[in-house]
Amino acid sequence: MVSANAASGMAVHDDCKLKFMELKTKRTYRFIVFKIEDKQVIVEKLGEPAETYEDFTKCLPDNECRYAVYDFDFMTQENVPKSRIFFVAWSPDTSRVRSKMIYASSKDRFKRELDGIQVELQATDPTEMGLDVFKSRAN
């Protein structure tokens, strides 16, 4: 079952919401990478809880857009362990213009489907979503 978006004609596969809820409530995954395929958003890759930030960044292609969700663990200044759910809109400069437009026009609608996103990052190259960026945005 898919829910369609009248504005961009983009549908979101139910699996996207299901896997996101599992990440959010059960912490089943460290990250999820989504891609747009045949006018719908689908789950491309699920990262196991033990996987690292480096594993996550390796899943993002150099020249194709993706959406991703990353469950970021960190320590507060009071040494309290916390986590934040990041939504990453990955749109490398080297990706096709049409692809960038499709991902950009569908992003807000898709993000709304994922109830519980805490921080949004837009990145066109790896430095814009480095660990230091995650740390500074998490607090």
Image (spheres, rainbow, N blue to C red):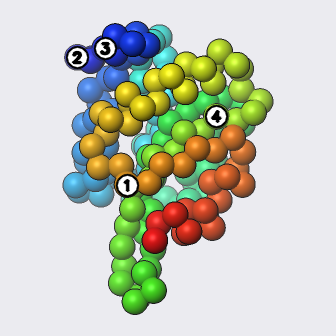
Which of disc 1 and disc 2 is earlier in sequence?
2
The amino acid at mark 4 is: Ser
Label 4 – label 2 distance at C-alpha: 27 Å
Q: Could you say where residue 29 lies in the image, as x and y percent from the top left?
A: 36, 52
Q: Which residue is mark 3?
A: 4
Q: Could you say where residue 118 lies in the image, as x and y percent from the top left?
A: 37, 54
Name the residue located 65 percent from the left edge and 59 percent from the top edge. Answer: 130
Which dot, 2 or 1, sits closer to the camera?
A: 1
Q: Which residue is mark 4?
A: 91
Q: Is residue 23 left or right of residue 120?
A: left
Which dot, 2 or 3, sits closer to the camera?
A: 3
Q: Which residue is mark 2?
A: 1
Which of disc 1 and disc 4 is earlier in sequence?
4
Q: Which residue is mark 1?
A: 118
Please rate how many residues cluster around mark 3, counting C-alpha atoms within 10 Å: few if below 14, some from 14 to 19, many from 20: some
Q: Nearer the viewer, residue 37 or 90?
A: 90
Name the residue located 46 percent from the left edge and 71 percent from the top edge. Answer: 139
SS at badge 4: loop
